[in-house]
Amino acid sequence: MNRTYELTCDDEVDKPVPVTLSDGTGTATDDAIGPERYWEVRIERTVHGVLPRLGKVTAIVFRCEPQPTNYFTKELRVYRSGDGAEIGRTPTFDVSGFSPEFRPETLKIEDGRLSADLAFYGERDAHGHPSILRHVTWAWDGREFVKRSETDLSHTDLSREQVTVDGIGPARIGMSAEQVEKAVGAPLTLVGDASHCTDGTLAGAPDGLSLMFMENSLVAVSVEPPAAVSTASGMRVGTTRDELSDTYGDEITTDSVEDGSERLVFAPTAPRFGGRIIVFDLSDGQVDRFAAGTRDAATVGSCL
């Protein structure tokens, strides 16, 4: 976390330039960085392990933000754990558009290989919103690191899933952002830092479906127009107050009424639900938004 590295910002420049980090962050202002005024660099992930023919190694994911620009790059480099000497870096991906983005928390050294999940850009994806999640592995061939596999992770169509007090489909309340991405098989875009309160959307999910995280734990799933997903009991945006009452009976209560709006709360009593609820906000007697999860989070529904 406190040393000088030689980096290219994922081949932003041909020749590596020195960047001195303190507590894992630093700035490069060398003339060799190109047209940008400076690079902001930080370490996102460090893992230790053993690789064949190399022994004990340390792998590091660096995030580099050339300034002034509105993009960032990431690169993965490997060092000898004993003396810190650089062994090499994984190759840049040969793609026509934006470079894929490492999911640093997934980086591992196991079974004689480096591995990580990366979010790749589809042909129509906007910058910052990659839609394809893949698992990639690399191995040392005696001279350099080479890619050994690149596999699409199985994708769940959330438009076909139902919302329950436990989440939606394979995305379950209590999962970390990394676990949600893996479970659904789609990149997750977060507004802010998942270690605090932040909202997120999954690539390919219906517009209007969002996820709320607190301290990197999924706490609520929110649905608003135009999303057409329903609860397991068939309740959705547009459902009437009477339909809610008929469906949930004594387990639904009125929580608050304000400015002509109304809030009904479905709180199943069985211990296995752990106090989780579904909150329905109504206008003119119809649901215009609902959220499921822990009581505090579902009541709020969003970090914004």
Image: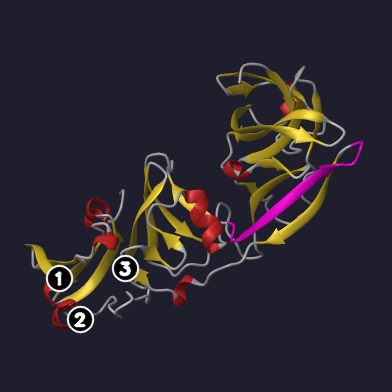
For the view shown, which residue lies furthest in the front direction?
271
Type of amino acid at the residue the image marks with label 2: Thr
Sequence order check, earlier mark of 3 and 1: 3
Q: Is residue 223 magenta?
A: no
Helix, strand or loop under label 2: helix
Mark sitting on residue 224: 3
Q: Quadrant of residue 220?
A: bottom left
For the view shown, which residue lies furthest in the right direction?
142
Mark in front: 2 vs 3: 2
**Percent position of residue 258, x then y:** 8, 61
From what the image shows, is residue 149 above or below residue 246? above
From what the image shows, is residue 57 above or below residue 234? above
Q: In the shown orientation, is residue 223 left or right of residue 253? A: right
**Percent position of residue 243, x then y:** 18, 83
Question: Which region of the structure is painted magenta?
Answer: 130-143
Q: Quadrant of residue 79?
A: top right
Q: In the shown orientation, is residue 278 left or right of residue 76? A: left
Q: Can the viewer see residue 166 in this picture?
A: yes
**Percent position of residue 203, x then y:** 52, 62
Mark sitting on residue 252: 1
Q: Are marks 2 and 1 in contact (CB under 8 Å)?
A: yes
Q: Can the viewer see residue 8 in this picture?
A: no
Which residue lies under the disc numbered 2?
247
Circle 3 packing at 10 Å, graded few (<14), some (14-19), many (20+), is many
Type of amino acid at the residue the image marks with label 1: Ile
